[in-house]
Image (cartoon, rainbow, N blue to C red):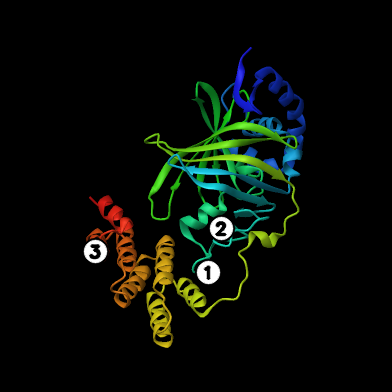
Amino acid sequence: MPVLPINYRGSTIPVVDLATTIVSRTAGALRALGAGASLLILAGAAAGAPAAGMPTVEEILAHHAAARGGFERLKAVRSIIYRGTYREGGQVVMLHAAMALMRPYYKLVGDPEHPDPDFAEGYDGSAWELYGDPGIVLRTVGAASAAGRHATRIGGPLIDAADAGSTVTLDGTEEIDGRKAYRLLVRMQDGFEQQELIDAASWLLVAQRKTAPIHAFGSSIASEERFGDYRTVDGILFAFAVREVEIATGKVLNEMQWTSITLNRDLDPQAFSPPVFRHTLLQRFLEQLYEERGDEKAVLWTYRDFRRAHADLDTRAGVEVIGYQMVKMGDHQGAIALLQANAADYPRAASSAFALGRAYVAAGNVADGRTALQRALAIDPAYERAAKALAALH
């Protein structure tokens, strides 16, 4: 008897057993999809009628929902808390990583029951990031905002497609590890697209493909996430293992191993928003600089006014953080102007020269970036970040 390559609490699930379960649930799932599926059906029709013997988008989604535990059960989940270990480059980056989702669209990269005062990010209607040092909250735009808002739905991009304003089309079939998979194309309301690959036997999600920046200054990378180690939680199957690989090179970018998934905790929506705290003069100044991004003259005016009025305050490290965040948001010129002023005010700080060099490079001005990075190393020959950044330019 053929078996599925799915780890189910340490065992494998026979195809015939899972298929029987799916068949018994699929009719109900089709009914449960109801009006919410009409958008999906129309999207599938727009791509042309399916080939003979090929299931429709509606049928694939119904089978997928049934395989995971049933559409109604999935839609009844109010909140999810994921906890586990996150790795990059084979090294543990976060031993106690956590993420939480709550309907209709809330997301927290962090633990809502054990908040981290040093860093958190989330989505409460718009994307935000918290930095405990220097103590600022930033609302993000651009690629950082997109990364925050594109994965906020409890049911994922397929089950909750209609709720998220997305369309789903059938884009063909292919083999994943020697097994047939249906390739679905999800187009989100902002135009972002990603592929979801559904195993044709198990009807579970086995891979997801997208093109997006991996880190703040990185270029967009085409990557594939592989899902496995499926286990049941309160009657619903979840993938406990996720590995993201760069498609062009096969390099493993990151790995997430969930150790627990908790459903339907009663969470306060405020847990998905940044904390409210009383700002110091310096913290408010830094947030003002960030809020003025896109207006170089306003940024420099605010910077110089504050420096004159509060000459006793050390603004260097905080301004370097804001300059970095402005570059992330795409305001290269404003960031460069701010970091030039900062480097002039702190000429003996290697970190100020490094911050300016990094901004130059991100803006495409490699020559000035190299000069600034060399200046950072002249100030501090042991400054490893500057040395690595300089080496990357050769």
| Sequence-first disc among 1 and 2 | 2
* Horizontal and vertical percent position of residue 107: 62, 54
Residue 372, above or below 183: below
Q: Would you name the residue on which mark 1 appears?
A: 135
Secondary structure category for the residue under label 2:
strand
Give me the C-alpha separation between circle 3 and circle 2: 32 Å
Q: Which mark is residue 302?
A: none
Return the x and y of residue 40 as percentages of the image width and height.
Answer: 63, 40
Residue 124 vs residue 247: left or right? right
Q: Which residue is mark 2?
A: 121
Residue 177 in the figure: left or right of residue 383? right
321 lies above or below 311: above
Please say if 12 is above or below 161.
Answer: above
Amino acid at dot 2: Glu
Which label's residue is closer to the chain start, 3 or 2? 2
Which quadrant does the N terminus fall into? top right
Q: CA distance from mark 1 to mark 2?
A: 13 Å
Tag 3 residue = 368
The picture places residue 320, in percent across and down from the top left corner, at 39, 68
For the residues labelled 3 and 1, the Cα–Cα distance comes to 31 Å
Q: Please state which amino acid type lies under the numbered disc 3.
A: Asp
Is label 1 in a helix, a strand or a loop? Answer: loop
Nearer-the-camera pick, 382 or 171:
382
Q: Residues within 10 Å of mark 2 (few under 14, many from 20)?
A: many
Q: Amino acid at mark 1?
A: Gly
Disc 1 and disc 2 in contact, CB within 8 angstroms: no
Indicate the position of residue 37 as horizontal and vertical percent values: 68, 40
Q: Kindly give the residue lying farthest to the front in the view shown.
A: 382
In the figure, is residue 92 to the left or right of 311?
Answer: right
- When asked about the image quadrant of residue 31, the answer is top right
